[in-house]
Image: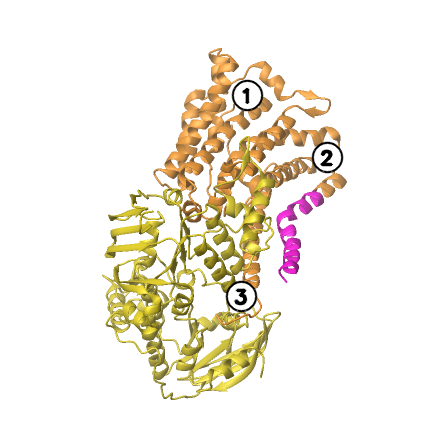
Amino acid sequence: MNRPFLRMVGIKKWFPGVQALKGVDFEADQGEVLALIGANGAGKTTLMNVLGGVIQADEGEIYIQGEYADIRTPLDAAEHGIAFVHQEMALMPTLTVAENMYITRFPSRLGLINYKATKERCTQALARLGIGLDPGTKLQHLSPGDRQMVEIARALLSEPQIIILDEPTSSLTSREKARLFEVIGSLKQEGVAIIYITHLLDEVFQVCERAIVLRDGEVAGGGILKDLTYDDVVRLMIGSKEISPHFGRRTAHIGDAVLYVEGLSRRGVLQNVSFTLHKGEILGLWGLLGSGRTELARAIIGLDPIDTGRIQVRTDGSMKAIHPQEAKNWIGMITEKRREEGLLLPKSVKINVSLANLPALISRIWPLIDDKRETELAEKFVNRLEIVISSLTQPVATLSGGNQQKVVLARWLQRNPPIYIMDEPTCGLDVGVKAEIRKIIGELADAGAAILLISSDIDEMIGLSDRFLVMNRGRIVAELSAGSPKDKLMAAAAGVV
Amino acid sequence: MLRSSRRQLSIRDFVLSYGFVIALVLVFIVYAVSTKHFLKLTNLMAILHTCAPTLIFASGLALVLMTGKLDISIGSIIFLATATGGALMTRYNVSPWIAFPVMMLIGAVCGAINGFVVTVLKVNPFITTMGSMFVLRGIALTVTTGVLVGIPDFLTDFGSARIGPVFVDFPIALVFVFLVYLLHTRTKFGRYIMAIGNGEEVARRLGVRVERVVFVAFLLSGLFASMGGILSMAQVGGVSLHMGVGLEFTGIAACVIGGISLFGGEGSFGRYVLGVLTLAVIENGLVHMGASVYAYPFVRGGIIFIAMYADTLKSLVQTKVKQTIEEPEPTGVG
């Protein structure tokens, strides 16, 4: 047998304005779980897209078992025994589980699809992963975890020798995660090479044996994980850049109330939620997945209807009741779904930055947008947030996740609303950018903004918040002061008060 | 927990998907009670008769819609194919054995051109087929030399032929739709169409040759349009200069009423048949109600609007359902 099983040599890839891969050498062996780690924009996904035939490298070669492999399309990759489980799931919601899994390989008889055989095979394939799903269920009726398992089950159908898992646990519950790790274990036993892409270093040390760290399109280092510490890996990821994962607590200057929510209810989702948010305060909204945190945020700014309840904001020095539909005038919303909710991806950085603030950019002479002012303001905020771009006209789609999130922030900073709601503002970003964005959040509060912060990262919560509200099943079950210990927060969220 | 939410969902789904069946039944009752002749067997058979060409010419369009694309050129394709076929048979005495294949070839070629422009030149399908709608009608008008094109007698006879009370063309159309149904549900091509309708990028990543499938869908749309055109010219007994005008919208209306989503990835040919029937029943009833001719476009427009709104509503409800299901019981943090 030729070793290593997979070898990628000198892979280079240019995108408009950036070189995403600067000559990467990469090797993987059978029966190993290899972690591919790197900050956002380091080139992990690009490298794997090259291997999976989703995009083609501009330079470089791929060898499998020592033989040159010409991979141009996903089909070529499949023929070479490569399966790619994508981060954004490649599933079709209106089709059934069986159809999703067998779409390119239906068993057929006389040219017609044999549905009975499809279903039987599908049930077997799912059973192998310990999943008891009905093959006839439509994908849109499944939980994200089950969808992920269907995706993995589909990848395994071709009996691949190399499996690429791109952030496979991002939508899984802990039970589903455990099941996935079992499956990875048994695949390893069967001699499959598994490439595991993730941000979560805990998982890397739990599941993988070896790591390769990418930084700015180059291999920054790597090695056997047993010989590495958490800090080693982080240092490889971020290079020389300073980080402080545990930031010093701010001294907050809390002022008058600016947002007052009273008796907010929505049937089956929110129950009688009341709270006050003050000027200069970061209020941490803590709760487990499904506790109603995001739903509360959506209800406040009018994205979801409410049954009862009142919302007041401070305008011109006095509190005034507003309709949730008007809330957008006072509240800036920043979410983790920056791609879906926040950004016009094909448009330029400039257009995206000024989007929330267009009325203020109208020229004084005629009712047209003042281009000079737009450019000046955009430049100002790009510099302030240290957004890495080649020019203001660069399309947002070509930026890394961290820079995209900064563009969203820049947009709201320019508008300067008195209140912010931030739902997982650093989700999916790498350690370095996380720290930068946390610093910006702190500065915003110091400058007098009132911030409602939602985060699943308990360290981020504790590090930033001046006060906590804990939610469980749509209700606020506890209010805790800054400096409350982790276990107290966890217990409150689980309903043990 | 999932089970119960699925059951609630299916009732909702049923109302949204088959709401027009309820409407069909209501309209049927209203017509039956308020007019003298609507419920007579001859009239009911006449309704099925009018459905026959639509069932065929809109079935290819249905495939295109399922990929999330649009074809508004089928009316002009019908005109060009039937005008050429009619002219060949009556003006040049060409045998129908040659004329019919030529008509189908014209349909297929027109569809293929649409498919080429959409998949290779990457032009928006609406603009592409709007262009061919004008161009093909222009060519067809040249073919007719500006006067009505006749058709041979055997074809006229076939257009009104019956077995017992049933017009022959309706069962033919049903058999045809059944074949398309098999194509849609039981072949890879049919499944690929649904995959593309769910998301082109997703389908491409799975190794579906998106361009090829979409190309074939457009080709079939043109081919089936010309085949429906044959039934249509047989019924009318000739090819007028207005042949096929507005048929693309009749087709789209029938598809949308039949639950084929304009967003792509959704629809079945069972419901499609009901959609075609619904449209035919409503228009037939208007005749018996003695409604003004000018009321027809109004009613048809209204129906299309309502059906589209129901389509949008359905996709909205589905996103909401997705959201509520996406919250499992708390099992861990983030």
What mark, if any, has residue A175 been given in the picture? 3
Asked if residue A371 is among those painted magenta in the image, a careful observer would answer no
Which of the 4 quarters of the picture holds residue B142?
A: top left
Q: Nearer the viewer, residue B325 or A329?
A: B325
Q: Which chain is yellow?
A: A
Percent position of residue A194, x then y: 40, 55
Quadrant location, the C terminus of chain A: bottom right
Residue type at numbered disc 3: Arg
Chain B pictured colour: orange
Q: How many marks?
A: 3
Q: Circle 3 marks a residue in which chain? A: A
For label 1, the SS is loop
Query: Which numbered disc, 2 or 3, marks the residue closer to the eye?
Result: 3
For label 3, the SS is helix
Residue reaching furthest to the front: A1
- Same subunit: marks 2 and 3: no
Horizontal side of A416 relative to A391 (left or right) equals right
Q: Circle 1 marks a residue in which chain? A: B
Q: Residue at x 52, y 61 (%)?
A: A179
Magenta highlight range: B1-27
Q: Which residue is denoted by mark 2 in the rendering? A: B38
| Distance CA(mark 2)–CA(mark 1) | 27 Å
Regarding residue B156, the answer to whether it shows in the image is yes
